[in-house]
Image (cartoon, helix red, strand yellow):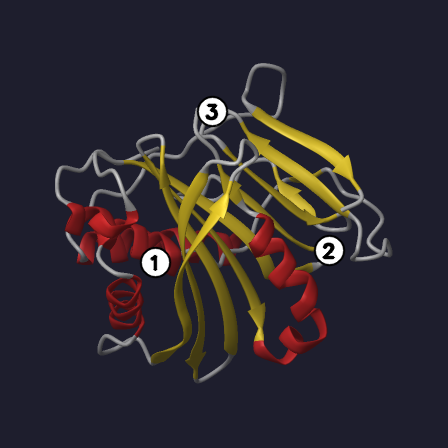
Amino acid sequence: MFVLFSAFVSRSEDLFSFYGLRAPRIRRISPRTGSGKHFHCVSATSFQSENPKNVSRRLLGRLLFASVPMLTLVNHVNAEEALTQFREYEDTKDFYRLKFPAGWDCATRPPQGLDFACHAPGFFDENLTTTVQTTKIDTLNDLGTVDDVAQRLVSLYDRPGTNRKATILVATRVVEGDADGEPQEYYQLEYVVESSDWIRRYLSKIAVCNGRVVSATIQCPEEQFEADEDVLRRVIDMFEVYVS
């Protein structure tokens, strides 16, 4: 497991260097009082950028890295619990909240570049991750249209030498009301990535709010996706940001 994690970190640093970006510093915020990270049981560091193109490249790079093995797991709930039960996670420092299956495990220290990470019990390839980066842009449109963002994401996967191919299935802009009824814009992407060894389905949801670009991404092996599709789509739909 440690070897896999080390290989991922090395690969991600190489990719940041390849794109002329500075690798993010690891955020170490433990889940204790005052941390701004909160878990609830229910039935159910950053970049500074003056150029929207830089923001979009960094965002897409982080989406590219949102599939990782994780270490030091906590908050384990009986893996046999029904997938219809969820736990809630709220980040009151970065102003977003989400829900995930109650049987999933969470990482106390998310891998570099990620703000939050959890995965199916004993199955690291099915996971949910979030990224947060500070920005000076005001709206998602400053990143480009949703189709622009989708095509740039494809270009990251399809570059020569990667032996991977990305196919966008859905790229859409949605407006949802937050907990206070205020409208919030999101880009939602669904795509498949194929390599010589595996095929994976991704669901991503991206927002700009409170001077931050915040994204949530679900990854699942394609052969498992149909069985878990309803739950995974519900999880990505429940991700939301809110105004501080």
Q: For marks 2 and 3, give the one nearer the viewer.
A: 3
Give percent across and percent down for residue 58.
Answer: 26, 50
User: Which element type, helix, strand or loop, lies under badge 3?
Assistant: loop
Q: Residue at x 28, y 62 (%)?
A: 149
What's under tag 2, amino acid-wise?
Answer: Pro
Label 2 Cα crowd, 10 Å radius (few <14 / some 14-19 / many 20+): some
As measured in the structure, the alpha-carbon distance from the residue carrying label 2 to the one carrying label 1 is: 25 Å
- Please tell me how many numbered marks the rendered image carries: 3
Mark 3, residues whose alpha carbon is within 10 Å: few (<14), some, or many (≥20)?
A: few
Which residue is labeled 3 in the image? 93
Which residue, given by chain and number where applicable, does mark 2 sit on?
121
Where is residue 167, by image quadrant? Answer: bottom left
Callout 1: SS: helix
- Left or right: residue 9 compared with residue 118: left
Is 20 rendered above or below residue 133?
A: below
Q: Nearer the viewer, residue 183 or 44?
A: 183
